[in-house]
Amino acid sequence: MIELIYLSKLILPLLILTILLAALFTKTDAYSAFVSGGKEGLQMAAELLPFLVGMMAAISVLRSSGLLLYITNLIAPLFAYFSVPAELFPLFLTRPISGTAALSITADLTHTYGPEHMISRLAAVIQGSTDTTLYVLTIYFGAVGIKKMGRALAVGLLADLTGMILAVMITVWYFQNIWS
């Protein structure tokens, strides 16, 4: 185990050394390429900033206004019909929008119920089984100027729904088999 930790600390310096050696052998100006890449990265970050701020503000308003809690209480009977804890609804709703917001909801559920509770396990598996579709489409499609994203949005949300349903089914099946 100690060797793996020591090896992991060497990977990044070895990677940088490999890149510098490759630049030396191919006679590439590595410093100019590094500076050019840095400028391009800063320009892209500046272009992405309005999309990020808009997404974060929308999520914050949704949580702070109490609308999320209201919708959760409204939809609880439907979740009870499928034997899915209604406490997971905010996670279902925010996961396609923002990974950070979904992670904070997962952390909150784990803190509230404890890591061994089925709700915490379900939240963790859902977190790992789905993606931030709206975030990805907004940021990456926005960065390259793609405006028509209807089909990509539909496929992404369908994949998220499938991931959530399968995460619930497999997690319940797995942990019921372990404890029985």
Image (tube, helix red, strand yellow):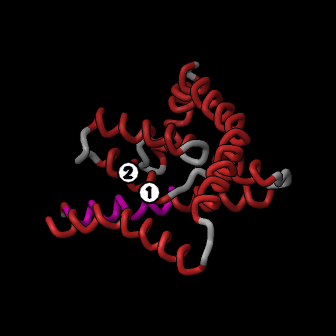
Q: Position of residue 139 (x, y in %)?
A: 69, 47
Q: Give yes or no for residue 177 being in the magenta stretch.
A: yes
Residue pictured at 25% horizontal, 68% vertical: 7
The residue nearer to you, when weighing 36 against 80, is: 36
Q: Which residue is mark 1?
A: 128
Q: Which residue is mark 2?
A: 124
Give left or right: position of 132 versus 111.
Answer: right
| Magenta residues (range) | 164-178
The residue under the point 48% across, 47% down is 81
Q: Quadrant of residue 47?
A: top right
Between 144 and 100, the one lying in front of the other is: 144
Q: Amino acid at mark 2?
A: Ala
Residue 133 visible in the displayed image = no
Pinpoint residue 80: horizontal percent, then vertical percent.
45, 43
- The answer to which image quadrant residue 85 occupies is top left
Residue type highlighted by circle 1: Gly
